[in-house]
Image: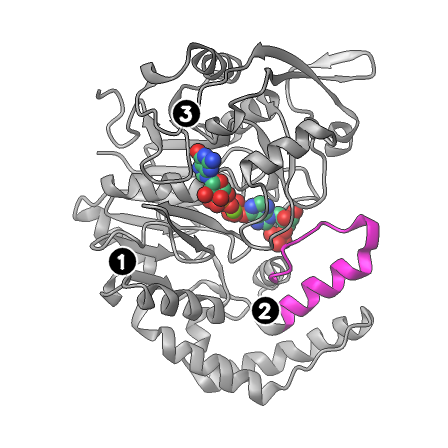
Amino acid sequence: MPNVVVVGAQWGDEGKGKIVDLLTQYADVVVRFQGGNNAGHTLVVGGEKTVLHLIPAGILHPGKSCVIGNGVVCDPEVLVTEIEQLKARGFLKDDKQLVVSLDAHVIMPWHQAIDVAREQSMGQGKIGTTGRGIGPTYEDKVARRGIRIRDLLDEARLARKVKDRVALAREELARLGAKADLDEAAIVKKYAALGRRITPYVTDASLWLHGALKQGKQLLFEGAQGTMLDVDHGTYPFVTSSNTVAGNAVVGCGLGPTAVDYVLGISKAYSTRVGSGPYPTELKDDTGERLRKLGGEYGATTGRPRRTGWLDAVALRYAARVNGLSGIAMTKLDVLTGFETVKIAVGYRTGGKVLEEMPSDPELIERCEPVYEELPGWTEKLEKLRTWDDLPPRARAYVKRVEERVGVKVIGCSVGADRGETILVENPFRPGAK
Ligand code: GDP
Ligand code: IMO
Ligand code: MG
């Protein structure tokens, strides 16, 4: 049985959390490998909603393990809150269910302060980050001055590292004109206490995962953000600070590429983006507003209204390429019910030419106008439908057209937020089986 990577194929918020929660029944272990609490993954089970920012979306399944890998940037305060909230609701009864890598980098108070202060100082040119300190934490990791989970477990070592780093943080914050109350002793005390609180979960996650693989356990990797927000392959600089693509799944948890058998890209039936940056199919009109309303398009982390637009098959084909997608799950198909026509961007018009491939220059993407293919819409409600054949012919034709344009099979459609509101045509854990 294969190990499966789930990644966002658009600009994030594609419904990865829902699909990971659904697929966890076929897996033994769910692994987060990048990003941090900039992510907001929503699960709805029997009408009850859970939003997870750090803990993998498999946690509602007792008996399944959830791993936070070395590639994740971890705010221990958010982690502890999430653990407590889950426990209060009767989940995570067995502490063995959660595994946190000793090598994950820690988001410290100055990271968040710098993130927010920089955005404020950038004005119009801002990235529109989630303000959670993600970028500055990854910067420190690459600059080799980061603080890792293992450092929280040794107070003397933590004190040394905080002392080394905090002076630099003060300088940067002063330069940005931001007030910062960075009391070294208080920070050390607080973060050492957080370290003690998460000690039961902390281990060498790479070794742990290797052991799980040796026992024949099935892994499900849970990507955060989306392909177009990847620091290398996205619309740089309007991106997040990690590699969000499937190739990073194994790097971010200490396994090798042979551990991955199947890559599932998640795409909405239309598109959204939060924050600044190029977005060719964006609709700034009534149709965009209608999509936002019907789709409830407000950020799960920041509550910001999401930008909305039609599905972009150029971007999806690009996602298929840079992730090596084996299949696509299309979410929120129900939201398109009632539109007279539905549109798919199949090319980008720029300078009198039509491009079929995603330009590698983001400034060129900014200047592109989408070329649309328009298909007839459908009026039937989809929430209660459970098989492919139940779907109205026009909805099926829409999905098939996307599949043709992207060149990757759509193996499932989501028709509502709830775990059960899903049509799975092919199970990625049993490819080829009916
Ligand atoms: P993620 O970050 O990729 O996990 O996605 P988010 O949770 O940020 O955003 C997806 C939103 O769409 C959440 O509010 C989900 O509950 C909701 N959702 C997921 N799938 C569907 C679906 O098929 N239909 C509808 N109407 N909502 C969905
Ligand atoms: P999930 O996992 C959508 C966006 C921010 C901003 C850019 C950089 O829920 O899909 P950052 O705080 O990461 O430095 O912000 O990336 N962004 C997301 N957009 N979904 C997310 O996560 C996102 N995480 C970051 O809005 O444009
Ligand atoms: Mg989200």
Pinpoint residue 227: horizontal percent, then vertical percent: 55, 37
Residue at which label 1 appears? 208
Helix, strand or loop at disc 1?
helix
Could you tell which of marks 1 and 3 lies nearer the N-terminus? 1
Residue 113 numbered tag: none
Q: Residue drawn 73% across and 28% down?
A: 365
- Compared with residue 308, is residue 169 higher up or lower down, i.e. above or below? below
State whether the magenta stretch is mostly helix, strand or loop.
Answer: helix
Pinpoint residue 43: horizontal percent, then vertical percent: 40, 47
Amino acid bearing label 2: Arg
Q: Which residues, given as a range, are shown in magenta? A: 110-133
2 vs 3, front mark: 3
Q: Nearer the viewer, residue 53 or 362?
A: 53
Q: Residues within 10 Å of mark 2 (few under 14, many from 20)?
A: some
Amino acid bearing label 1: Trp
Residue at which label 2 appears? 145
Residue sitting at the far bottom: 185
Position of the N terminus, as image quadrant, is: top left
Pinpoint residue 177: horizontal percent, then vertical percent: 82, 72
- Compared with residue 416, is residue 136 higher up or lower down, i.e. above or below? below
User: Residue 363 vs residue 380: left or right?
Assistant: right
Pinpoint residue 59: horizontal percent, then vertical percent: 31, 54
Q: Is residue 177 in view from this perspective?
A: yes
Q: Residue drawn 59% across and 69% down?
A: 145
Residue sitting at the far left: 215
